[in-house]
Structure formats: C-alpha cells, structure tokens
Image (tube, rainbow, N blue to C red):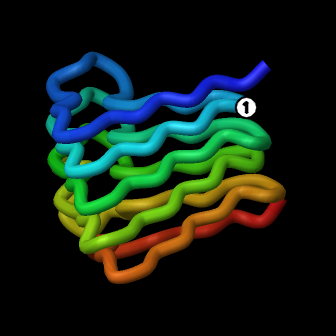
Amino acid sequence: DSTYVSLHDCISASNGAQGVHVNTHALVVAKNASILGNGQQGCLVVGHYSSLKLHAGVVRLNGMQGLEMRDGGFVSLRAHALVDLNYAAVPLAVQARVDGTGSWLDVEDSSVGSATIAFSA
C-alpha cells in the first residue's frame, strides 16, 4: 500500500519531533508550507519509495537538520524553497543529510543553507 498527502499553505510548527515524517511508500507534496521550530528534523524521509516534494516553502529553526533522507528517501525542492537556520545550537551545522543507498536530494531554483552532507552506504 502507498499513501499520498497534499499540503497547501500549511504550517507544521513546534512539534516535539519532526515537522513532517514521510515513511516507506508514502508521498507528501507541500506547497507554500512552513515547517518551523520542531524539536528534531524539519523533514525526515525514510525508506524506499518515500518522497517529499516541497514547492516554495520554508524549513527553518528546527532542532536538528532541516532535511534528512535515509535508506532510499527522496526530497525534491522547487520554486524557491528555502532550507536554512536549522540546528540552532551549531551555527555552521549541516542543513540536509542524505544517508543510505538510493537516498536523493534534488534542488532546483531553491536554497539549502550553509551545508549539505552525504554518507555512502
């Protein structure tokens, strides 16, 4: 089974964990979404066939990375999406983490703050 969620002009803020958590066989499309001030990652995308498409949104001021893709997770940033100022305790911290075989970050006309890190499988 697979799951599809579409979020338009929404705010996901001040959650104790992730602002958005996408798991295996799920797709989330977020347009003009604000993912702000969550306790852990702004967006965590885990497992094969798990995808997050962020269009013109912002991921900011979260406790850990703005974006984390693991074990085949895919994130697409479009239309001036912005990922910055996450992991506030570490000024030059990684904003996006890509970890595991098949994980992917695709950025077009968007910005991922100060740093991105990728780990091999």
Which residue carries the number 1 mark? 25
Q: Position of residue 47 (x, y in %)?
A: 73, 37
Between 39 and 19, the one lying in front of the other is 19
Residue shown at 71% from the left, 57% from the top: 103
Q: Tell me if residue 1 comes above or below residue 111 in the rendering.
A: above
Q: Tell me if residue 58 comes above or below residue 6 in the rendering.
A: below
Q: Tell me if residue 13 comes above or below residue 91 in the rendering.
A: above
Between 73 and 95, the one lying in front of the other is 73
Residue shown at 65% from the left, 37% from the top: 46
Quarter of image, res 14: top left
Quarter of image, res 81: bottom left
Q: Tell me if residue 84 comes above or below residue 53 in the rendering.
A: below
The reply, left or right, for residue 17 in relation to residue 88 is right
Q: Position of residue 69 (x, y in %)?
A: 59, 49
The reply, left or right, for residue 44 in relation to residue 80 is right
Residue shown at 63% from the left, 24% from the top: 3
Q: Position of residue 74 (x, y in %)?
A: 63, 54
Residue shown at 48% from the left, 29% from the top: 5
